[in-house]
Image (cartoon, grey):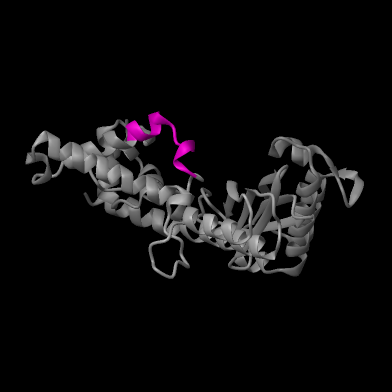
Amino acid sequence: MAITAAMVKELREMTGAGMMDCKKALTETNGDMDAAVEFLRKNGQAKAEKKAGRIAAEGLCKVVVKDDKTAAVVEVNSETDFVAKNEEFQKFVAAVADQALATSAADIDAFLAESWNADSSKTVKDALVEKVAVIGENLTIRRFAKVEAANGCVVSYTHGGGRIGVIVEAETNVVNDAVKEALTNVAMQVAALYPKYVSGDEISADYVEHEKEILKAQIMNDPKESQKPEKVIEGMIQGRIKKELKEICLVDQVYVKAEDGKQTVGQYIAQVGKENNADLKVVKFVRFETGEGIEKKEEDFAAEVAAQMAGN
């Protein structure tokens, strides 16, 4: 299969690996993008976490909360940062967030098809199309999430003027200012350190085994580490997987405001619960980051890739 500059560019954005490493990975895997990502990871040239971080688009994330029980977050994209700062656009995003707070839609297609709260003669999609005409730029309502707390409360946090929006849901028998402040701190943690799970209980055995395979491949591709005894290699794998899981599980992460630099988020939540006679537990979080996973046009960079490929 012919490996194109566009394929190399896409793989580099997904992994953060060098251009020629990406070209080699695609060549070795006959252009299979997923297999190429695995190839780079096993050779220690990429990290899966970089997939979203290296891709960008403009727009805003907006979070709204009602009565500490219901929250919604939306992401609405624009072509330029200039429009994202436009008051007309920001008002529209706020209206979309209010729509999401009241919606019963299960997916984005159903959401776009429902009646627009501000004018029942239109659908949400109709309102979007009208706003595109007014603002003069392509706009997209990309995604939404709605969280309802049956046995506790929800809190929100917005970072960077709408670049990141977070909702945290907790089960608790006490909802006071101290509890809500603690949960807001946890939402800030989610925004800053991007956990994938609340706790290890949510992680499947298949995921763990897959990550172990990746770690083993990395070790076997290292001239020095691969020469170590099998028991030592197994210990290395166990140690590294344990460290990785702590980094991606919210309650196991070191709390960013920990005074001793060691307290975990789980320990912090337990401390706040004890101080407020509350049975407090974080059960869910949602984190939206503007442009996450969306490719932004980078024509100059694509030309650079093509030129370097042609010269090699």
- Is 159 placed above or below 109 here? below
Of residues 308 and 194, the one nearer the viewer is 194
Residue 168 % position (x, y)? 62, 52
Q: Which residue is drawn at 63% across and 49% down?
A: 170
Compared across the picture, whether 162 is left or right of 128 comes to left
Q: Magenta: predominant secondary structure element?
A: helix
Reply yes or no: does residue 53 show up in magenta. no
- Is 222 placed above or below 213 here? below
Q: Which residue is drawn at 49% across and 61% down?
A: 192
Residue 121 % position (x, y)? 92, 44
Of residues 305 and 25, the one nearer the viewer is 25
Compared across the picture, whether 124 is left or right of 142 comes to right
Which quadrant: the N terminus?
top left
Of residues 104 and 7, the one nearer the viewer is 104
Q: Residue at x 7, y 40 (%)?
A: 227
- Location of residue 107 by image quarter: top right
Q: Which portion, as a residue range, is magenta?
A: 199-210
- Location of residue 157 by image quarter: bottom right
Compared across the picture, whether 120 is left or right of 243 comes to right
Residue 19 % position (x, y)? 29, 51
Compared across the picture, whether 240 is left or right of 86 comes to left
Residue 23 % position (x, y)? 28, 43
> Does any portion of residue 47 appear in the rendered image?
no
Q: How many numbered tags mark residues here?
A: 0
